[in-house]
């Protein structure tokens, strides 16, 4: 088993990454038209 | 996603399996701190240097530049995860499960955070979480100080923003007056402008607009009298028919304009379905002193996606009306996956027609551009086919189409063209001569024109061909536009160009509306080509390099086959996820909820599957893993046509739970693949896992664009089919790799290699 703190830190980075992707999608919907906003998200 | 790929490649320069635990954790702490700091830098950059104008489609360069702002932080995060996964292959199942379950859990507060923190400042939440990750692994004083500083900075800026009325970081529209209100939620940002004393303009995200008219309560608190001006808009023709129309359903309330004609007409009950809660709040609360529509007893505002809401309303309506419902609100993968799309399909119209009374009328208003009538032709084809589905084989007596006054601005294929609003009326009971005469009188009054209907000489021969059952299919096939009636499997009403038109029309001077669509397709195809090049480049970087400093010939063969395996599962996972999203968005209704449910359930299931992978497949036998994966996905593909059965579950909560449970199971099975693959590839060399992480990420990028392209051209079910085929390819590659390893006696069993001892 990995050390607990490593697992928690991985969880922090993974959740932060997903939040960034969701939030950036919303911001880009304001900056661009929608059908472009998901492309940077996936890129 | 590119950040993950680049981060994986950069992480492959080192061997995370060596070195003390303290050095390893300090390295990860630094990467997490960098991720946190770079999110804050990106937030400052995007709000400092951005002055978006209203209107105009952005260029590919602009899109790429904004994407690059976030790339450095995501590279740091990608390096962090690649290094963490490569430290010890015995940990992979557990760590991958933590990674995915945490990502799943993050879907839940995303909506609450957007509502709570209001605007770009919400990016400080992930910055704070990443800083917490850095602090957890900080072993030295410098890492601890950095972690504490980033946590403190994030918290302080969130507090300052909240205390200042959410004005710390803003994306300000250029050239407009100062908004009197700005409101963010999971659907949109809405900014309100005081247009003049009589109107407020409400801008949704970049440029979609709706208006709110001044109609306060009288000084004595009574409701204002209906105004004759309310009967002049494109929303009014249905009432000019003068049938008994007491119960009305409005699709998309917006600023309340569409509620005015039925109020003027004297409807007894008006149900206003609105997807975006902000609009309901504006009418009922924020602007209730400016506009009293929310106080009218006959008006009922319902927060629901309209198709789902009407389907489960238990009501029969005399009018179901949708006027210019086209915010282009994409809420799923790629482009053109719009929240409005479910309104313009044959299945959607079956819901509407079945909820009309016998004399009821379904009416929709769209752009009508005489020189490029793509929307009009498609709307007529949709109406004719939907009536046939409802048992009315010859629609000619049941459809009326008229146009409103010509507008001055050019809209579509050339800027010289003149556009109008076109309104269609559809009824299961034929329109009679007196009704047609009343509509003709109304058109004369407002400067419009009756273009199609029983006894009306058609102005466009294609109208007649579409309405005639014998010639309809030929008219659809012969059209220069894609005017085929959309279905739920391919619900892209607004995409009226075909992929081949990208070449045929590349030099065409587009107007504003068409340019939005065309540019989106163009950008998508370019990005599709770029994604393919990225996958090829990453594959070259990995397949033609060594998996480690002491790689054996057998190890290199296993490593190359496993590259194909990780390519297949990366590609397949995203195709399955986005295919399901495209399909379920229509069944679940709320697009953002659909996104959250699909993401949360699949990630949660994948995390659980990863955690169970070691127990269910102790020797990571690829034959068994591949059989379970492909078998389950084949069943999923067979089951897709039966998805509308979810709609028979009366309770929305139960419906949500049933779909979520299905997705957890699917995600769980897909979750077996990554840990099993890591256990096969890790023994081939110290750089192998990081490189597989990069391949997996690159494949995910290519799959996201591919899902949009396949969905648009071949439909949702084929997106899933390509996902299944990707897993078939991955399964074959994994079995071959295992066979090579067995013949070469290459160690693949996880238990054979002892884990490094944790530091004391």
Image (cartoon, rainbow, N blue to C red):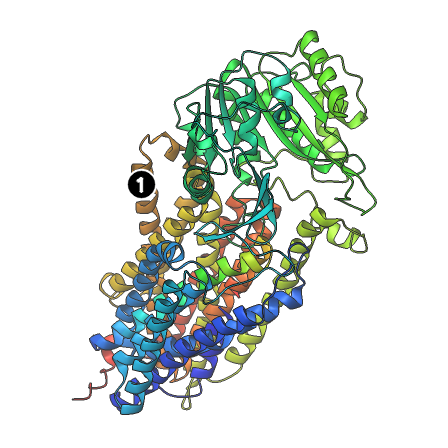
Between residues B135 and B661, which one lies in front from this camera angle?
B135
- B510 w.r.t. A11: above or below: above
Q: Where the C terminus of chain B falls, by quadrant?
A: bottom left
Between residues B649 and B34, which one lies in front from this camera angle?
B34
- B461 w.r.t. B654: above or below: above
Q: What residue is shown at x 60% (from left), y 71% (from top)?
A: B65
* Left or right: B140, with B257 as reference point: left
Between residues B377 and B248, which one lies in front from this camera angle?
B248
Circle 1 is placed at which residue position?
Answer: B658
Picture coordinates of residue B1, whole percent (x, y): 48, 68
Q: What residue is shown at x 31% (from left), y 50% (from top)?
A: B665
Q: Let me know if residue B631 appears in the view.
A: no
- B740 w.r.t. A27: above or below: below
Residue B604 figure quarter: bottom left
* Left or right: B15, with B209 as reference point: left
Q: What residue is shown at x 54% (from left), y 35% (from top)?
A: B343
Of all residues shown, which one is farthest toward the right?
B416
Per the image, label 1 sits on a secondary structure element best described as: helix
Picture coordinates of residue B558, whole percent (x, y): 42, 76
* Left or right: B34, with B494 as reference point: left
Q: Let me know if residue B643 appears in the view.
A: yes
Subunit of label 1? B
How dense is the environment of label 1, judged by Cα within 10 Å: few (below 14), some, or many (20 and up)? Answer: some
Residue B311 figure quarter: top left
Residue B468 figure quarter: top right
Q: What residue is shown at x 48% (from left), y 29% (from top)?
A: B218
Between residues B542 and B113, which one lies in front from this camera angle?
B113
């Amino acid at each position: 088993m990995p050390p607990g703190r490593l697992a928690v830190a991985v969880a922090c980075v993974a959740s932060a990454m997903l939040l960034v992707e969701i939030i950036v999608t919303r911001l880009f919907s304001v900056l661009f038209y929608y059908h472009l906003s998901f492309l940077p998200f996936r890129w | 996603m590119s950040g993950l790929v680049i981060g994986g490649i950069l992480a492959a320069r080192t061997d995370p399996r060596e070195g003390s635990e303290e050095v390893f954790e300090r390295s990860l702490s630094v990467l997490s701190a960098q991720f946190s700091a770079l999110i804050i830098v990106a937030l400052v950059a995007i709000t400092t240097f951005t002055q978006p104008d209203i209107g105009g489609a952005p260029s590919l360069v602009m899109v790429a530049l904004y994407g690059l702002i976030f790339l450095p932080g995501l590279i740091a995060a990608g390096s962090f995860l690649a290094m963490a996964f490569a430290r010890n292959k015995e940990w992979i199942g557990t760590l991958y499960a933590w990674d995915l379950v945490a990502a799943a859990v993050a879907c839940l507060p995303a909506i609450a955070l957007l509502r709570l923190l209001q605007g770009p400042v919400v990016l400080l939440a992930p910055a704070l979480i990443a800083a917490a990750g850095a602090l957890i692994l900080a072993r030295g004083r410098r890492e601890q100080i950095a972690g504490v500083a980033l946590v403190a900075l994030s918290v302080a800026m969130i507090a300052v923003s909240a205390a200042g009325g959410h004005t710390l970081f803003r994306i300000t529209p250029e050239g407009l007056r100062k908004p009197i209100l700005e409101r963010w939620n999971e659907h949109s940002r809405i900014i309100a402008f005081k247009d003049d004393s009589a109107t407020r303009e409400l801008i949704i995200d970049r440029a979609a607009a709706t208006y709110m008219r001044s109609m306060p309560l009288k000084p004595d608190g009574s409701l204002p009298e209906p105004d004759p001006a309310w009967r002049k808009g494109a929303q009014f023709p249905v009432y000019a028919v003068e049938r008994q129309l007491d119960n009305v359903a409005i699709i998309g309330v917006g600023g309340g304009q569409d509620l005015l004609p039925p109020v003027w007409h004297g409807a007894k009950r008006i149900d206003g379905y609105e997807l975006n809660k902000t609009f309901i709040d504006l009418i009922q609360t924020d602007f209730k002193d400016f506009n009293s529509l929310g106080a009218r007893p006959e008006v009922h505002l319902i927060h629901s996606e309209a198709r789902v809401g009407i389907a489960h309303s238990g009501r029969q309506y005399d009018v179901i009306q949708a006027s210019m419902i086209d915010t282009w609100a994409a809420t799923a993968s790629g482009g053109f996956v719009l929240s409005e799309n479910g309104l313009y399909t044959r299945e959607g119209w079956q819901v509407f027609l079945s909820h009309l009374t016998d004399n009821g009328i379904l009416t929709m208003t769209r752009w009508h551009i005489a020189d490029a009538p793509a929307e009009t032709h498609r709307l007529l084809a949709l109406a004719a086919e939907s009536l046939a589905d409802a048992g009315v084989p010859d629609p000619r007596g049941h459809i009326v189409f008229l146009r409103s006054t010509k507008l001055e601005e050019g809209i579509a294929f050339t800027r010289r063209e003149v556009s109008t609003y076109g309104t269609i009326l559809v009824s299961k009971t034929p329109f009679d001569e007196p009704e047609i005469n009343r509509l003709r009188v109304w058109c004369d009054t407002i400067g419009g024109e009756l273009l199609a209907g029983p006894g009306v000489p058609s102005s466009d021969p294609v109208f007649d061909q579409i309405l005639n059952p014998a010639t309809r299919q030929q008219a659809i096939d012969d059209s220069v536009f894609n005017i085929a009636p959309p279905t739920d499997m391919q619900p892209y009403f607004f995409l009226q160009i075909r992929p081949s038109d990208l070449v045929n029309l590349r030099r065409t001077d587009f107007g504003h509306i068409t340019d939005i669509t065309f540019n989106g397709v163009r950008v998508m195809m370019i990005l599709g080509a770029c994604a393919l090049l990225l996958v090829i480049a990453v594959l070259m970087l990995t397949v033609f390099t060594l998996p480690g400093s002491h790689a054996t010939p057998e190890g290199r063969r296993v490593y190359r086959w496993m590259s194909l395996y990780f390519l297949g599962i990366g590609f397949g996972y995203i195709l399955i996820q986005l295919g399901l999203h495209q399909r379920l968005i229509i069944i679940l209704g709320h697009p953002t909820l659909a996104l959250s449910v699909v993401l949360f359930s699949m990630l949660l299931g994948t995390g659980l599957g990863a955690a169970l992978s070691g127990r269910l497949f102790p020797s990571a036998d690829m034959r068994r893993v591949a059989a379970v994966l492909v078998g389950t996905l084949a069943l999923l593909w067979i089951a897709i046509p039966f998805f509308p059965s979810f709609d028979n579950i009366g309770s929305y909560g139960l419906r949500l739970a049933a779909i979520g449970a299905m997705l957890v199971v699917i995600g769980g099975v897909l979750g077996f693949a990554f840990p099993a693959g890591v256990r096969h590839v890790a023994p081939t060399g110290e750089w192998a896992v990081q490189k597989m992480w990069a391949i997996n990420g690159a494949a995910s990028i290519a799959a996201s664009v591919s899902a949009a392209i396949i969905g648009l051209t071949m439909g949702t079910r084929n997106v899933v089919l390509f996902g299944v085929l990707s897993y078939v390819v991955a399964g074959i590659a994994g079995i071959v790799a295992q066979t090579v390893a067995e013949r070469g006696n290459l160690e693949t069993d996880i238990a054979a290699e002892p884990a490094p001892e944790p530091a004391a």
